[in-house]
Amino acid sequence: MAEKIQSIRGMNDVLPDETPYWQWVEEKLRQLMAAYHYDEIRFPIVEKTALFKRSIGEVTDIVEKEMYTFDDRNGDSLTLRPEGTAACVRAGIQNGILVNQQQRLWYMGPMFRHERPQKGRYRQFYQLGVEVFGLNGPDIDAELIIMTARFWKILGLEKSVNLQINSLGTSESRAGYKTILSNYLQANKDLLDEDSQRRLESNPLRILDSKNPKMQEMIEQAPRLMDHLDEESQQHFTRLCAYLDAVGIAYEINTRLVRGLDYYSKTVFEWVTDKLGAQGTVCAGGRYDGLVKQLGGREIPAVGFAMGLERLIELLEKEEIKKHLKHPHIVMLMMGERAQNAGFALTEQIRNEVRNIRVYTICGAGSFKSQMKKADKSQAKIAIILGDDELDNDVVTIKYLRADKDNDTAQQQQITQQQLIELLNKLS
Ligand code: ATP
Ligand code: MG
């Protein structure tokens, strides 16, 4: 036998017994986006490396360690997108859809990061991303949070996740704080790990995002950015809190929340669960008022978030969703060659005349018994049997596979094709 080729570590297949949960979540997300009047945008999975370096920041985990970067055949440096925001901004600027307009956009698809694979952390993973352009008030920040809170309810996860919020201020106000933070970190230099020592000069704020347990106490004691906010950011944050209070969304103000990317300003937030071990963040986002300009566009305010679909699906109550899975309504059994010829025409007629019906046609022939076994397994409600007898008499045999109040499964009856269509129209 030829040697088997395995998939890439951290890049998973989603098999048919799992895809229904993915489809369920995706469908609910599409409905959610429609309910808030957001439009879908699609952009490539690969972009020029410079796009991510310039937006996410050179001195971040993603850019320093996690990007899938390669030279293509022309020698251009390309990168598999590690996140969607930068690409969305690039697409918005390039297509001229950001200037003098407001955009409320969403996208869904795979992202790629070369991390150590573990539960809830993969090298190809899926995100829903939402990005809003052209609005600078805290009301839109609140809408994004309200929208995600609604989504947890739809998924039955409202008790599993908690909201943390913080403000990073404007980049000007952050500059002053950076000096104060640097001084503090300098004084505690021996407590810093290798990454953080290196970032002390280049990006001290990133040190606050460290997950290293040994550094948590030192980080806890660090001067708080919240105490150094400019007036405008302070007001923005107070208004945001007021909106959340007004709709009854509970939150925790986490003054250490800085997020792992450089482009954020003012509002940042994360929805966190304690049910997934260390991989606890299921949704994260914030405002990034400087990014459009930084990537060559006009000065356009923006805010967004991304949620990781694997972590969400891990949290779902699957038994509950199973009840909503879509089985076929009917299954067609065709006995003999004549019936097979006539059967395809009949199933097409059924699909033409019965709206939204799901018909499973058993292919590959086989004995009645083996076809019945497949029919049973399909969980269809009704089997339709077509054989020589039925064809001679211009009828079909129907058999109920699942008993309900009107039918018992022992019963078998013969009806005309027209009667069948009428019956199915009542059923689907
Ligand atoms: P973490 O702190 O867990 O590394 P992050 O801050 O790097 O997350 P973001 O870049 O904000 O994550 O991405 C938003 C969301 O995407 C995360 O909250 C998480 O749900 C999901 N996510 C990020 N990286 C991965 C990954 N490697 N595998 C699966 N999901 C991920
Ligand atoms: Mg990460």
Image (cartoon, rainbow, N blue to C red):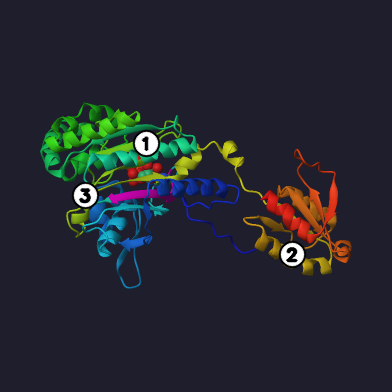
Q: Quadrant of residue 109?
A: bottom left
The x, y position of residue 79, in whole percent, is: 33, 60
The x, y position of residue 146, in whole percent, is: 35, 37
Magenta span of residues? 121-132
Q: Which residue is mark 2?
A: 346
Q: Earlier in the sequence, mark 1 or mark 2?
A: 1
Quick check: is 126 in the magenta stretch?
yes
In front of the other: 271 or 205: 271
How far is mark 3 from mark 1, CA to CA? 23 Å
Asked if the residue at tag 1 contacts the one at tag 3, i.e. Cβ–Cβ closer than 8 Å, the answer is no
Q: Is mark 1 within 8 Å of ligand 1?
A: yes
Q: Which residue is mark 1?
A: 271
| Residue 278, visible in the rendered structure | yes
The x, y position of residue 218, in whole percent, is: 23, 28
Which residue is depicted at the point 23% across and 38% down? 207
Quick check: is 175 in the magenta stretch?
no
